[in-house]
């Protein structure tokens, strides 16, 4: 019997049951349609190279099979400025047009410069952290940190915005660091020679004979490898640096919770390093494991000045950082190594808590290191 006829003949109670049944059947069909659509969408995402994950490097980024990279941090741009709190001025410069390498320069307040009697200031070349894959020299955290450090240490600071993996796997960041070092030295020397033509802040205020390298996390790794490369160049004067036979004299290297690994690392850490360098270097390579990979004699290439290693007590990289200092002290290097430990803090805590007593003590230690005490 047709449903319409059943409805016409039905009692009021039966009518309600039939209506409810129709509604239930309709809802079931709707859910079935939604399920089909949802399954179709899922299958579409699973086969879409823009959505299919190639490498999950959370919490930093995800790379998809299409090559698209989605970063979850370090993408905010803060413009250069005159910092109201410290009086430090900053500006952005292009270091290498070919690669797009840029940097942000910081100059202390005019009062601090004048108060120094017009003497040239130490030059600090700084490299930000971020596991080689995120962050930038223009990030609000690093902008604030460099403002404070420039004021505290009374230096001309150059914060380098090196290229990031995976679009530019290592050694791209190392090559950018080398280019930045040459650029800084060349611009400061052009001012010191009286001929002018260099970047004004470096040419007028920078003393390249008091050159320091520093960086946190991945930036600390970069600072170490740059110092080694500069030292190796000094040992081979036939290899020219920007047309000169002598490399710049690096007075000190500050490694702030640097990114080093050791012989025994987790599978995740091993995969991450392989992602950063596109599989070119193993975790036993001197780039990331100098403590184990470099013989005692190889450390002679490190500029014979001073090294400051800072370690945060709760940093899982702490054992590798300490091993670096032990290897350095036990090598044929001729400099002075200092280990500064902050108990109870995590990796690079000092970047985000500038006003805390521990962060203030950390920065005071770094400033004193640069100024020779």
Image (tube, helix red, strand yellow):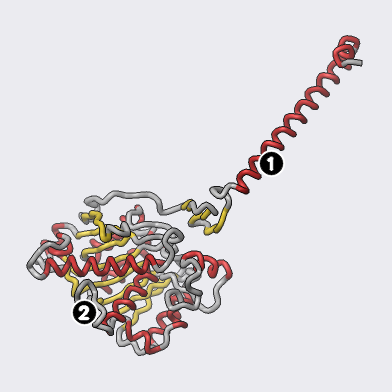
**Closer-to-camera residue (147/342):** 147
Task: Name the spot of residue 291 as percent of width and height, x first.
Answer: 44, 81
What residue would you read off at disc 2?
246
Task: Name the spot of residue 225 as percent of width and height, x first.
Answer: 36, 74
Occupied quadrant, residue 179: bottom left
Task: Name the spot of residue 251 as percent of width and height, x first.
Answer: 25, 77
- Residue 145 visible in the current orientation: no
Q: Secondary structure at mark 1?
A: helix
**Closer-to-camera residue (186/361):** 186
- The residue depicted at 24 percent of the width and 63 percent of the height is 157
- The residue depicted at 69 percent of the width and 34 percent of the height is 34
In which quadrant will I find the C terminus?
Answer: bottom left
Q: Is residue 311 above or below residue 129?
A: below
Q: Is residue 198 left or right of residue 364?
A: left
* Residue density around tag 2, few if under 14, some if 14–19, many if 20 or more, within 10 Å: some
Q: Is residue 291 left or right of residue 266?
A: left
- Residue 248 visible in the current orientation: yes
Occupied quadrant, residue 209: bottom left
Which of the labelled discs sits on residue 39, or is there none?
1
In which quadrant will I find the N terminus?
Answer: top right
């Amino acid at each position: 019997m047709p449903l319409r006829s059943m409805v016409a003949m039905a009692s009021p109670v039966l009518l309600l049951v039939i209506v409810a049944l129709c509604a239930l059947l309709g809802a079931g069909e709707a859910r079935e349609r939604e399920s089909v659509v949802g399954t179709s969408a899922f299958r579409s995402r699973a086969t879409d190279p823009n959505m299919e994950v190639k490498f999950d490097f959370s919490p930093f980024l995800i790379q998809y099979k299409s090559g698209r990279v989605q970063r979850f941090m370090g993408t905010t741009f803060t413009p250069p400025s005159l910092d109201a709190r410290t009086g430090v001025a900053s500006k952005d410069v292009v270091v290498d047009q070919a690669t797009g390498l840029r940097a942000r320069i910081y100059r202390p307040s005019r009062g601090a410069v004048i108060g120094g009697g017009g003497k040239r200031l130490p030059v600090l070349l700084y490299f930000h952290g971020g596991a080689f894959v995120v962050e930038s020299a223009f990030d609000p955290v690093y902008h604030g940190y460099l403002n404070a450090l420039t004021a505290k240490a009374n230096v001309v600071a150059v914060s380098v915005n090196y290229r990031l993996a995976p679009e530019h796997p290592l050694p791209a960041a190392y090559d950018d660091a080398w280019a930045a070092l040459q650029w800084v030295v060349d611009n400061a020397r052009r001012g010191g020679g009286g001929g002018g033509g260099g970047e004004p802040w470096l040419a007028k205020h920078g003393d390249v004979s008091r050159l320091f390298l520093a960086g946190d996390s991945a930036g600390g790794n970069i600072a170490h490898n740059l110092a080694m490369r500069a030292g190796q160049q000094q040992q081979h004067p036939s290899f020219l640096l920007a047309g000169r036979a002598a490399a710049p004299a690096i007075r000190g290297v500050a490694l702030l919770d640097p990114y080093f690994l050791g012989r025994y690392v987790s599978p995740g850490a091993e995969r991450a390093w392989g992602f950063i360098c596109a599989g070119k270097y193993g975790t036993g390579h001197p780039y990331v494991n100098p403590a184990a990979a470099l013989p005692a004699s190889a450390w002679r290439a490190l500029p014979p000045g001073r090294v400051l290693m800072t370690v945060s007590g709760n940093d899982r990289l702490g054992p590798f950082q300490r091993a670096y200092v032990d290897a350095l002290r036990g090598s044929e290097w001729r400099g002075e190594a200092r280990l500064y430990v902050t108990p109870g803090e995590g990796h690079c805590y000092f970047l985000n808590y500038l006003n805390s007593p521990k962060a203030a003590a950390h920065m005071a230690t770094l400033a004193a290191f640069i100024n020779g005490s």
